[in-house]
Amino acid sequence: MKLLCVLFAVLLLFSMAVPGYGQYEGACKGFCASVCGKRDEWTFRRFCKNKYCCLPPPKKGK
């Protein structure tokens, strides 16, 4: 029983450590807006309802 608890805890910690994993499919990783900027990438997500999910460009130099 202890072994099962340890395996479950390790699986839970691993799933939290992987970026993007564990978020439900409709989540927007950027911000919701009616109009995105020219440099932003946009997608449709259920989380934003009638708006766009805008993803800003990655910052250079980091």
Image (tube, helix red, strand yellow):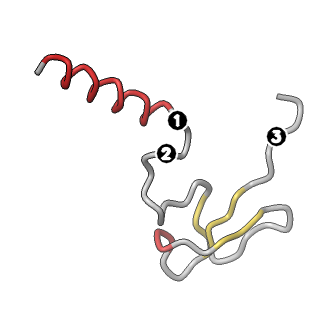
- Seen from this angle, which residue lies furthest bottom? 50
Q: How crowded is mark 1: few (under 14 residues within 10 Å), some or many (20 or more)?
A: few
Along the line of sight, the residue nearer the viewer: 7 or 49: 7
- Tag 3 residue: 59
User: Residue flagged by tag 2: what amino acid is it?
Assistant: Tyr
**Nearer-N-terminus badge (2/3):** 2
In this picture, residue 51 sits left or right of residue 40:
left
Q: In which quarter of the image is residue 30?
A: bottom right
In this picture, residue 3 sits left or right of residue 46:
left
Where residue 1 sits in the image (x, y, percent)? Answer: 11, 21
Where residue 20 sits in the image (x, y, percent)? Answer: 54, 46
Question: Height in image: 48 above or below 58?
Answer: below
Tell me whether the residue at label 1 lies in contact with that at label 2, contact meaning CB atoms closer than 8 angstroms.
yes
Between marks 1 and 3, how big is the CA–CA gap? 21 Å
Tell me whether the residue at label 2 lies in contact with that at label 3, contact meaning CB atoms closer than 8 angstroms.
no
- Tag 2 residue: 21
Of marks 2 and 3, the one in the foreground? 2
User: Residue flagged by tag 1: what amino acid is it?
Assistant: Val
User: Residue flagged by tag 3: what amino acid is it?
Assistant: Lys
**Nearer-N-terminus badge (1/3):** 1
Question: Height in image: 21 above or below 1?
Answer: below
